[in-house]
Image (cartoon, rainbow, N blue to C red):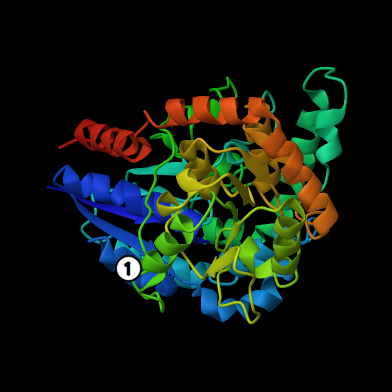
Amino acid sequence: MSRILLATLGSLGDLHPYIAVGKALVARGQQVRLATSIDYRARVEAAGLEYAALPPALAELGEPQQIAPYFFDPWRGPQRLFEAMINVPLRGAYEALRSATEGVSIAVSHPLTPALALLCEAHARPWLSSVLAPCSLFSVRDPPVLPNVPWLHQLPRIGSWPHGAVHRLVGAAMRRWERPLHALRAELGLAPIRGAQMLDGQFSPFGTLALFDPQLAAPQSDWPARTMLCGAALHDAPDPEQLEPSAHERLERFLAAGAPPVVFALGSSAVWLARDYWPQAIAACSRLGVRGVLLSGTPLQRSLPPTVAAFDYLPYSQLFSRAAAIVHQAGIGTLAHALRSGRPQLLTPAGFDQFDNAARAARLGVGRVLPFRRAHDPWRLARALRRLLDEPAHARAAAQAADTSGRLDGAGAAADHIMACLRALPA
């Protein structure tokens, strides 16, 4: 039996895949330690995994309603997130991970845990890198849709050089952001790297686990060496600290009372942008004469019509497959569950990888894209939903995508790759 360390930071979409992989490893007889923010300790331990603290705590970043617009700004948001999640806690994260790796045979990093890559490199410890979405592989041959320049994908294809130029610009910007990372590399006696640590430097020579579904992106020649496309690793459980233990019963009563509803879900991060969004969602349902379920993150301080129900949190597996359609932010975790539901989707990306995820889902034919900033207009939202519901091709494509993705076990495939890597290590 070996002990394996998984490290991750971010939203629930960043946490749940590693819980899923951890449970798959435990089922294979391994011990698993998961290092992440203190905010998620209860979720990690409820899954039967050993918890290790990894800064920063999400609560230290500020009130979610205030910091969400700050981080989701299309131009400055990524740098702000980088500063708050990587640069500021870097030294503390390195020390926490040094403690967490004691007794560990192999570690797995997340894109927001570069300190683990530095630690393993400095101490010659085996590790695997991992990504959750295609855009994190930074392919020029299959370039991502970027939130601040989505028009780049609408240009006629004239080779990969425009995307290569953008890749170089992004790399130069990130190199400036990550000066503390390069300073720490020097202190550890590691050789300097020419490019950005968070681009080419984040990938392990032992291999990279790509934890997204193959139908979203096919392997490319410029992916990191030894990339293993596993499929989405899914974990879907009630919040162990949920304040509404009767949510499941209330949901069942609502679903039994009428036609399948349109479900509005914004994950665990974009949901904090939605203060004035929920009234528009309710208004859109009224315009269309459909029922709705809102996954609002926090209690809504407003009365609801009898055709609409709101819940702070529900496991997607309880709800998505029973919807008429799903409106969501195209976070990679939400998208993975939506693809398995067999229901058409209205994709409303708000930032980061969501624009690329939404574009890839739209190419599958499972739905339509309406950027989140436009979804605040109930007329636009209702019109997009009507087009989605009235087009049978979306329902057919959604059913086909569900059939394909339902055959995958991304967590099991990732666990098998980790076990194979363990077996290949010197005794």
Task: Determine whether the residue tagged by mark 1 lies in a helix, strand or loop.
Answer: strand
Q: Residue at x 44, y 56 (%)?
A: 256
* Residue 146 visible somewhere in the drawing: no
Q: Residue at x 17, y 42 (%)?
A: 28
Front residue (pair 414, 268) = 268
In the displayed structure, 160 sits above or below 230; it is above
Residue located farthest toward the front when viewing the structure as drawn: 257
The tally of labels here is 1
- Residue 370 position, x and y percent, is 76, 46
Task: Count neighbours of disc 1 (C-alpha within 10 A) and say few if under 14, some if 14 to 19, many if 20 or more.
Answer: many
In the figure, residue 43 lies in which quadrant? Answer: bottom left
Q: Which residue position holds label 1?
A: 52
- Residue 195 position, x and y percent, is 66, 42
The C terminus sits in image quarter: top left
Q: Residue at x 41, y 79 (%)?
A: 243
In the displayed structure, 90 sits above or below 200; it is below
Front residue (pair 84, 369) = 369
- Residue 395 position, x and y percent, is 59, 30
Residue 274 as seen in the image, left or right of residue 337: right
Front residue (pair 56, 267) = 267
Front residue (pair 265, 291) = 291
Q: Residue at x 70, y 38 (%)?
A: 388
Residue 237 as seen in the image, left or right of residue 356: left
In the displayed structure, 398 sits above or below 248; it is above
In the displayed structure, 84 sits above or below 48; it is below
Q: Amino acid at mark 1?
A: Ala
In the figure, residue 27 lies in which quadrant? Answer: top left
In the figure, residue 393 lies in which quadrant? Answer: top right
* Residue 328 visible somewhere in the drawing: yes
- Residue 62 position, x and y percent, is 62, 80
